[in-house]
């Protein structure tokens, strides 16, 4: 088995993970803009040929520290390059860097090339040449936090280049993003059920062609004539030929059986002709119907009562003028609502505001990146209109009691929530013992309501089926009270097992919503993790950070998604440093900071264990925020127990404080006891727990505790000259 890494646009990681598993990959783990996996050389070939979502397939050959030019050169020279390319071969180098001392990617690529070439020259007096278009071997350098990973790029060229595109429009949609849109919208199932695929703004035909190749079981890379492994010395020709023969056989079966159910149109006659030529090159033109007309006049094709309308309208970034786009989106929405009942629709909107212009309510939303542009994929179920709503079964007496309680809570909180501009709050917290859950309400920037329901452990004498029924009632009643459809309700359920009660497998959708708090904006993910990215019970703690941060250097330990760092920056902190061991959370933190306009060197993100960071740093900070987990047993750091280790941690923080600095310490361990005996000789302690609990958590006032710790006032130092006179 070989360790491998597949790169992809951000937002496609979970889809790519599932795709690679279907291709035989093992030990598969999603990462930022890619997926780590293991597999044989055959698995790697299959990934290159069959992945509809990956950008490149990388085979790492070395990993080493590279904080300097010399270290990078030496690390690359330590690799035996004769195992990968011949002296007379050609090569190219791609490099990218982030959060490292070496920052110029073009220079890094040059140094890697020099190290490889110099090794060959020293051994044989012959050196490889550079070919940036189709080299025999393409080398990839990834430098993150001064750690270099050198890989062989088995794809050689981006895998979204399928080999069929002869011409493209002014703002083409990449083929792997088109495939992601189709998969998110459920196109394979719709095709199996006899549905059609229709793109009313088809451009060069990318969505339709990808949809046809997907339905026909044609490998997306089958028409490519170049891969990076073809000139690699370890290339196994027999294995590749076997993989390729299998793909050709599947295409020979799939293409003749393909239904003629692909329809596209565009207002530009040139684009229609371009789409036709691309479809011919891809071998699917005979299954297409392409016409020239605008999106407002598109209608369901004859003979089809169901299908998928999918399109990528202009965003106002490169095509068209922004002020004219809402009218276009509104017209599209009206057409879909009036003429495509029973169909599904998927629209890649430039942003949520354009999506709202359709006047359709999205069942699902996904953040996807079209190049560098962050976009939102909206999925609509176009249900028939009915004057008589479907009758729901009556609520049970218990569910009716729950509804009464939720309505009472909502009424009690409403005025204060509006007055204080709070868009995320706790609406219910096991108020009724029979309905054991916490319900949090999130209102996103489009003013759509989302619910996060977290089930508590049911008593042992409550049958599992009864607990499940009650949870379903919670979801139904909460959705009715807060007007949130089921698609916008996230439920975290507990499962009983040998290890006791624990939360089950989470969804992995990669869906984020933007939520405002105190004039700031944060990304929240309700589905993929136990926590959502924004601790609602710490709302007042974050406000305290903002109050204390003015003019101070701010350190955020166990930073999670760095919401406290955003507050500190907004409060006028001189700079912020956010430390967390998780690369996933640091990427999330980076997005939160950028979303609020806090970028650049003043806002550092450090991937490290908090205690190890304190041991290494010599910086001093005016405000340190410490909100550690109750327990941590990460493989990359020492075990941490907040009760056992908090005094040592806080004393280490005290050593990094300025003389007038403040430590803001909080944690959620219900049985926690502050070790005053160890701390009071060094720090003045102010208990701030009761005042740190928001009003919507008053029913669970022990959800966290909080303290402010400051150095004792220093005594006036003796004059050293006075000391000298005394000695005399």
Image (spheres, grey):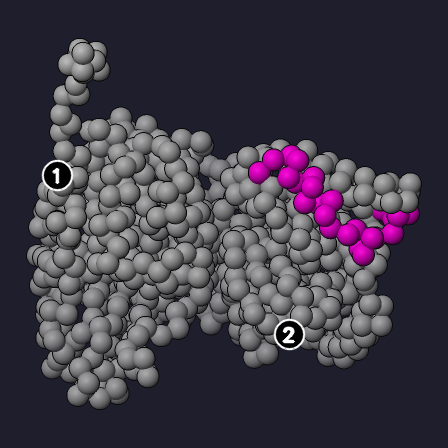
Identify the image quadrant of residue 117. top right
What numbered label is drawn on residue 684? 1
Based on the picture, tell me whether residue 85 belongs to the magenta stretch. yes
Q: Residue at x 10, y 46 (%)?
A: 687
Residue 96 visible in the displayed image? yes
**Measured from the top left, where is residue 648 in percent x and y?**
26, 49
In the rendered view, does 390 fall on the left or right side of 287?
Answer: left
Nearer the observer: mark 2 or 1; the answer is 1
In the rendered view, does 650 fall on the left or right side of 353?
Answer: left
Q: Is residue 187 above or below residue 713?
A: below
In the rendered view, does 289 fall on the left or right side of 35?
Answer: right
Foreground pick, 543 / 449: 543
**Measured from the top left, where is residue 404 in percent x and y?**
10, 70
The quadrant of the rendering that contains the C terminus is top left
What segment is highlighted magenta in the picture?
67-90
Based on the picture, tell me whether residue 217 belongs to the magenta stretch. no
The residue identified by callout 2 is: 24
Choose the circle earlier in sequence order: 2 or 1: 2
């Amino acid at each position: 088995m070989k360790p491998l890494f597949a790169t992809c646009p951000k937002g496609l990681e979970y889809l790519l993970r599932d795709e690679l598993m279907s291709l035989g990959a093992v030990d598969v783990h999603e990462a930022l803009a890619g997926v780590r996996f293991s597999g044989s050389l055959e698995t790697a070939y299959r990934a290159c040929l069959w992945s509809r979502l990956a950008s490149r397939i990388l085979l790492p050959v070395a990993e080493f520290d590279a904080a300097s030019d010399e270290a990078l050169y030496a690390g690359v020279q330590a690799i035996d390059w004769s195992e990968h390319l011949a002296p007379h071969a050609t090569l190219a180098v791609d490099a990218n860097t982030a959060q490292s001392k070496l920052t110029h990617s073009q220079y890094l690529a040059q140094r890697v090339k020099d190290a490889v070439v110099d090794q060959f020259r020293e051994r044989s007096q012959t050196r490889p040449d550079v070919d940036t278009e189709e080299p025999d071997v393409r080398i990839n350098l990834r430098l993150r936090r001064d750690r270099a990973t050198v890989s062989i790029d088995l794809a050689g060229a981006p895998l979204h280049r399928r080999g069929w595109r002869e011409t493209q429009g002014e703002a083409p949609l990449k083929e792997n993003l088109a495939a992601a849109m189709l998969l998110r919208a459920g196109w394979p199932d719709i095709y199996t059920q006899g549905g059609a695929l229709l793109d009313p703004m088809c451009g060069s035909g990318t969505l339709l062609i990808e949809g046809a190749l997907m339905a026909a079981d044609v490998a997306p890379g089958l028409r490519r004539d170049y891969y990076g492994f073809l000139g690699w010395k370890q290339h196994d020709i027999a294995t590749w030929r076997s993989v390729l023969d299998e793909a050709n056989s599947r295409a020979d079966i799939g293409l003749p059986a393909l239904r003629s159910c692909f329809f596209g149109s565009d207002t530009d006659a040139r684009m229609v002709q371009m789409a036709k030529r691309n479809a011919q090159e891809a071998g699917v033109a005979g299954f297409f119907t392409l016409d020239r007309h605008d999106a407002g006049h598109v209608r369901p094709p004859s003979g089809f009562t169901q299908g998928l309308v999918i399109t990528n309208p202009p965003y106002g970034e490169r095509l068209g003028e922004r002020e004219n786009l809402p009218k276009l989106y509104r017209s599209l929405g009206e057409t879909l609502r009036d003429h495509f009942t029973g169909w599904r629709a998927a629209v890649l909107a430039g942003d949520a505001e354009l999506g709202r212009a359709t006047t359709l309510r999205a069942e699902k939303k996904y953040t996807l990146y079209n190049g560098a542009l962050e976009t939102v994929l909206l999925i609509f179920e176009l249900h028939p209109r009915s004057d008589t709503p479907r009758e729901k079964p009556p609520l049970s007496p218990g569910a009716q009691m729950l509804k009464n309680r939720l309505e009472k809570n909502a009424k009690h909180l409403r005025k204060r929530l509006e007055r204080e501009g709070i868009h995320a709050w706790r609406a219910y917290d096991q108020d009724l013992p029979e309905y054991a859950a916490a319900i949090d309400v999130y209102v996103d920037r489009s003013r759509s309501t989302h619910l996060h329901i977290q089930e508590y452990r049911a008593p042992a004498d409550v049958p599992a089926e009864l607990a499940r029924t009650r949870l379903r009632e919670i979801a139904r009643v909460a959705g009715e009270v807060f007007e949130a459809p089921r698609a916008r309700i996230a439920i975290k359920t507990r499962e009983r097992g040998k290890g006791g009660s624990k939360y089950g497998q989470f969804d992995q959708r990669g869906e984020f919503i933007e939520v405002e708090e105190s004039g700031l904006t944060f990304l929240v993910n309700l589905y993929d993790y136990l926590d959502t990215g924004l601790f609602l019970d710490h709302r007042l703690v974050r406000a305290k950070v903002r109050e204390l941060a003015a003019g101070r250097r701010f350190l955020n330990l166990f930073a999670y998604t760095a919401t406290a760092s955003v507050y500190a920056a907004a409060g006028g902190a001189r700079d912020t440093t956010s430390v967390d061991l998780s690369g996933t959370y640091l990427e999330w933190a980076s997005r939160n900071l950028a979303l609020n306009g806090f970028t650049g060197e003043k806002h550092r993100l450090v991937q490290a264990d908090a205690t190890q960071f304190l041991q290494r740093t010599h910086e001093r900070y005016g405000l340190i925020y410490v909100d550690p987990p109750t327990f941590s047993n990460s493989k990359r750091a020492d075990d941490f127990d907040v009760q056992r280790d908090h005094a040592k941690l806080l004393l280490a923080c005290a050593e990094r404080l300025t003389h007038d600095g403040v430590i803001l310490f909080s944690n959620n361990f219900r049985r926690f006891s502050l070790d005053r005996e160890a701390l009071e000789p060094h720090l003045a302690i102010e208990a701030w727990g009761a005042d740190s609990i928001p009003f919507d958590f008053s029913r669970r006032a022990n959800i966290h505790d909080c303290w402010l710790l400051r150095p004792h006032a220093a005594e006036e130092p003796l004059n050293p000259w006075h000391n000298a006179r005394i000695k005399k």
